[in-house]
Amino acid sequence: MNKTDSAMATNGRTETKPERFTTKWGLILSVLGIAVGTGNIWRFPRIAAQNGGEDGAGAFLIAWVTFLFLWSIPLIIAEYGIGRNGRKGVVGSFIKIIGEKFAWMGTFVGFVATAIMFYYSVVAGWCLYYLLESIFYALPAGYEQADAVWTGFQSSAMPSVFHAIMITLGGFVILKGVKSIERLNLVLIPALFLVLIVSLVKALTLPGSGEGITYLFTPDWATLKNPELWLEALTQNAWDTGAAWGLILTYGAYMRTRDDITISAFQTGIGNNLVSLVAAVIIFSTVFGTLGQQMSNGEVLEVMQTSGPASTGLTFMWMPQLFEEMVGGRLFAVLFFLGLTFAAFSSLVSMIELATKVFVDMGITRKRATIGVCIAGFVFGLPSAISLDIFANQDFVWGVGLMVSGAFISFAVIRFGPDRFRSELVNTKERRVTLGSWWSFVLKYVIPVEVITLLVWWMYLSAAVYAPDTWYNPLSLYSVATVVCQWGIMMILFLIYNRKIAKKTILH
């Protein structure tokens, strides 16, 4: 029995020995392990390319950085505060801060991250497969070979097998408790940074790499008039930092009292976004440096925007081809996919921990909770492993669901009182930096406006532009109806069982 489950009898009742991160860097690296994942190394460069204008993608970077300070960091501060105050998972911490009748909100926040975990484990499996592919087999010499590798992989049972491997490995880490998570990330995250730095140096030495960097950072000011760019920028920053997933809230439960929430939040958000920028420089430098001699800039960008099913092509189909054209490319391919696997696995571990913590709070032993979560993760992730269409649907539904999670976290702070939250839960005696009133304004007004505006805009675009003939069809992969139905089913279930969920969480 591990420390989480060991108990001491005191005055006739059972008390569980609390777990805490042992060092400040253990906390920061573990939280970076939450956020630094495929969203940084694969998704961010692709989204930047898709939202680039004729002159460059710098305008997207401006919107993206704006939401770092008007969405991600304010919500990360809220999550740290709610988690450290509650000392439980998302459900228990929501109950403590705003009462039992809102347990369903915490449950929904936790479920969104868990639903993402179901298919995120599949992505982690892809990363591991391509790591092994780059070690044991020759890199593809052209598109046909790369496509054959991808198609052969997806049409086999291998995605399900590697999905099972990754979620099982994640379960082993979680069984050992928070100290195991801390030890893992003290090695994993610095190793990932080392891989990225080596890859960055190599990418910058490619002839023509400067064209890619110039395009990445040059603003096309006209694109700022496009509301879709702002929607993509907010969504991407949420993916980058892990804000509103409930994951940082869960790790906040293990935060030491003397750790400064404001400093930790800025370190988490800014550190994570720097990783995204480094990844983008690597990708843009590599693609432009390798393909720029044969293609125009427009053709190179088209490759970045359109390759591969389910938007996976840039990493899994093109990067091996790009490395094949480098001197020493085999080594750098191994390092790249090693880093990608590290990033995916550290994020997956945090998602398993979130769900496990909720059940531990209900009195279930960590061992039983972990095994149950991993079995459920494998079973509910299988459809995404088998079908890229289902994968894309789940990514769409629960990715947009992060905005609702952000709204619920903002609601919890508003109901508690933003100024009271700052003074009692953030600006403690041990603080080194005082959180100002700007944060209260952002949580009370800016974030709710962002959520309402972007959701209404998305629904309008879906009905009027993107899918006027299918937006009302719940069986359509990207319709408004499929999102509303899946959200609605889970919210209704959580509302029906709200009292039971709250009671079991409170009793333990």
Image: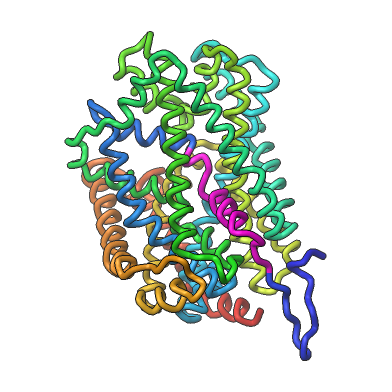
> Please, is residue 159 above or below residue 355 in the view?
above
Magenta part of the protein: which range? Answer: 19-40
Residue 467 visible in the displayed image: no
Residue at horizontal 64 percent and vertical 82 percent from the top: 507
The answer to whether residue 39 is magenta is: yes
Between residue 6 and residue 461, name the one nearer to us.
6
Which image quadrant: the C terminus?
bottom right
Above or below, 285 relative to 165: above
Please give the name of the residue rendered at 50% of the width and 81% of the height, measured from the top-left corner: 100
Relative to residue 186, is residue 447 depicted above or below? Answer: below
Residue 287: % across, % down: 42, 21
> Residue 457: x percent and y percent?
24, 52
Quarter of the image with the N terminus is bottom right
Tell which residue pokes out farthest to the front in this image: 432
On the image, the x and y values in percent for residue 233 come to: 33, 45
Residue 463 or residue 124, whichever sits in front: 124
Residue plotted at (75% across, 57% down)? 176
